[in-house]
Image: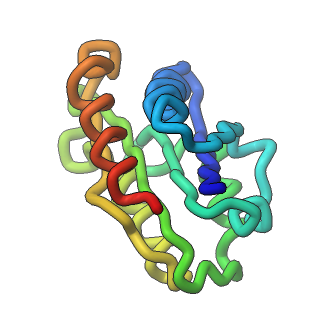
Amino acid sequence: MVSILIIFGSTSGNTELVCDEVSQVLREKKYKVVVQRAEQSTPSDINKYTYCILASSTYGQGILQDHMLKFIKKCSRANFKDKKFAVIGLGDNKYNTEYIIESAKILEKKITENDGVLLTPSLRINKTPVLHLEDTIKTWAMNLSKKLK
């Protein structure tokens, strides 16, 4: 059975909200989905699943949420050869337009540096995700589900 691990870093709950919506869509498509916090994850968890989605918000001058940052540092020596990933990045241009949704870029880079494969363009949400639950987020998750085997 196809299984999907969603690992997220969330401080205010927005990233968690997006991951919950994505997981609901994927479960409706009959995929086995596990959602877990970055602080409760290890790089070896990724290899237990068919696919992995990494999700984080962007803080300060374009850095990952604290727990996701620590998790990604643990992944520095991980080999994700041919492992298939998707990325969710959140941000808010009211803080710094130069680094808007930088989290998606950072996660994409770490995946490809470690020989992982990106399945689809990243989901990028600017400002509150609540306004995008029924359209952008659901559509992205539906399109992602079509790429899973």
At 52% across and 52% down in the image, what residue appears? 53
Q: Is residue 141 above or below residue 47?
A: above
Direction from residue 102 to residue 131 in the image, left or right:
left
Farthest-out residue, top: 130
Residue 52 place in picture, x, y as percent: 57, 57
> Visible in this render: residue 130?
yes
Residue 83 place in picture, x, y as percent: 56, 74
Foreground: 114 or 69? 114
The quadrant where residue 75 appears: bottom right
Foreground: 16 or 33? 33
Residue 135 place in picture, x, y as percent: 21, 23
Foreground: 30 or 80? 30
At 69% across and 62% down in the image, what residue appears? 46
At 48% across and 82% down in the image, what residue appears? 113
Q: Is residue 108 above or below residue 115?
A: above
Q: Is residue 50 above or below residue 39?
A: below
Direction from residue 129 to residue 17 in the image, left or right:
right
The quadrant where residue 44 appears: bottom right
> Visible in this render: residue 66?
no
Residue 106 place in picture, x, y as percent: 42, 62
- Which quadrant does the N terminus fall into? bottom right
The quadrant where residue 80 appears: bottom right
